Amino acid sequence: MAESTRRKTLKPYGLWESSLEIAEVFRHPSPPAYPFWHRGELYWLESLPEQGGRVALMRRTGARRKECLTPENYNIRSRVHEYGGKCFCVTGRHIIFNNYRDGELYSQRLEAGAMPEKLELGGGMECLGFADLVVSRDGSRLVAVAEAAQSGRENLNFLAAFALSDQELPGRLSVTGSTVVRGADFYANPVFSAQGDRLAWIEWSLPDMPWDQTRLMGAEMEIRNGSVRVGKKKTMVDRPGRSVCQLGFLQDGRLLFASDSETVDFWNFFLVQEEEISRLTDFDFECGEAHWVFGQTRWQATGHGTIVAVASRTDGDELIEIGIESGEYSGLLSGFSACQHLSLTRSGELLLVAQYADRFPEILNFDVGRKEIRLRVSTGTGLPDCALSEPEFIRFATGADDLAYGYFYPPANRRYRAPEETLPPLIVMVHGGPTSRTTSALSLLKQYFCHHGFALLDINHRGSTGFGRKYRQSLMGQWGIHDAEDIRCGIEHLVNGKRVNPELVFIRGSSAGGYAVLRALTQYPDAFAGGASYYGIGNLVTLSEITHKFESRYTDNLVGECFDRTASTHADSEFVLRSPVFDIDRLSSPVILFQGLEDHIVPPDVSREVVRLLESRGIPCGYVEYPGEGHGFRRTATRTDSLLREISFFTDLVRQCP
């Protein structure tokens, strides 16, 4: 035995004391978002957990420090589609942003100490919020996706346009607003042509989600009598089973977009010129992304006959350059766990947010012409001095000769070793969505579990994004079946490889991942020793009755049945058959649940129903509610408390194991 190994404390897996302090897990800021240059200075958005998770505009000063420009009473977030995303734009010396607290648009000069000023929109427009703000190059017009409440009916979503002016009030902005486009259930990704006289966007209607089918639309625009007017709408793409995303005009007026279909498995690039659509690329990797939030910019035109784009492969992202005429590509940068939020300066330098497995996210300033990184800015403040578990990309066989994917993290702690011939307990992590994707990006939360002596499987089950349309859509009609089966197969893969202890397998997840927790525990009860569900779904009937508009028909597609308030409560309904609450008698292991009281996506009643059933059947469970938290905990105190309770829950179960 090596001397360094002998010096380690001998203690069973799962009972190690973490050398990573829990305060360290949540001390660092969230990954930077939507970086941009303005007048020679670097800006980005950042969530501030110590301030309730509000989102603020940050600036890198000449002294290489960062300063917050958004006053404390303002939060650059949006309620549109509930998930929000990018909800600001920059014009002249101003940032225009949606304030989460009141859903109003504000203008603020890009300088220290400047106070936001509410924009009086006119026209009696009362909205819950705005998102995907885009301004024309000349600064004269602004378009945004808007959402408004309707009494007794679902929210109304539409495109709103505003004429901008700072002539009458020097140093301030004035706007004139009007509703421009309505009629579809949802809108996203509005883009202006270089001259600002043409607008393109995507729209879709229920029961489709944006990765199922979207329409590519366009129209001419003009300012008349101080208001923006839109000409006759033109449909460019509208075909069953075709999903369009990532729109943008090239300098020559052609429209570029990404699309998949029943015959194009991966999101590839297409061009629109004089109403003719041609396919540009034939890739077997993703250039698009499932639209959960606004502002997912994955390509930029260089102005030299190429575009720079993010290519998502099965095990990570890379940056590539694509010829606009040839469709041929070459690699630029690789080794990313994830890469997003591309923007290009007029001088040809590219900004992007890069995430890695072994260090904090960075904002990169990349010179496309010279093919070199000019600047790296990390918003993290010093990587903890402790061992890091290195993620291993794995693939394994699942049902019907399919494959599923994931990342395996072994235990890692410099201070401890486990008795020989023993295997670590396993925690299976399941992402939300379920149409989403996990990556190998550094997560101190995952590392915290590994420091306690747990192995971890972070799984991309069938239905996850990043593996083509066929893989993504394979969960349609099979939710609660394919994903649960893939979880079981992933566990068996690691058990058969003698990498984890089959008697100590736990599972955790949030939202749809929380549903996967409860579903797996009821379908494969012998496989698990316990589970943790964060705002998870126990009853699909309850969820369908009370969830928000954006996902109001999502469950219909996932279970393969249209929801009906009467028929869907029958014993033979898929909504009943797939709901863990109706199989709760099969669950045999302890469960702990966490819930935000302000969650409008999975409201508290969904979790409370699960708890009542568990308690009535004598199944050990814990349940914690957090006031002020919504769908996804944002406050440091909440995150810390829930993680402490969860790790204590798991370690207690490890101690109880013979």
Image (tube, grey):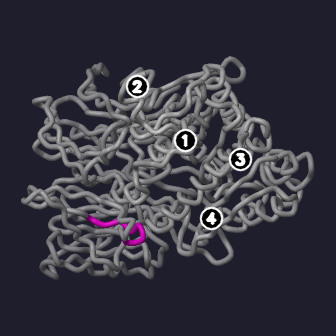
Whether label 2 touches label 3, CB < 8 Å: no
Identify residue type, mark 4: Gln
Residue under label 1: 211
Indicate whether 179 appears above or below 563.
below
Mark 1–mark 3 distance (CA, rounded to whole Å): 45 Å
Residue 55 part of the magenta segment: yes
Residue under label 4: 595
Q: Going by the image, does 35 lie left or right of 204?
A: left
Q: Going by the image, does 180 lie left or right of 426?
A: left
Q: Residue at x 85, y 48 (%)?
A: 583
Mark 2–mark 4 distance (CA, rounded to whole Å): 46 Å
Q: For the magenta stretch, what is the residue range?
A: 51-57
Identify residue type, mark 2: Arg
Could you say where residue 597 lies in the image, as x and y percent from the top left? Answer: 61, 71
Screen quadrant of the N terminus: top left
Q: Going by the image, does 619 lie left or right of 204?
A: right
Identify residue type, mark 1: Trp
Whether residue 215 is visible? no
Mark 2–mark 1 distance (CA, rounded to whole Å): 19 Å
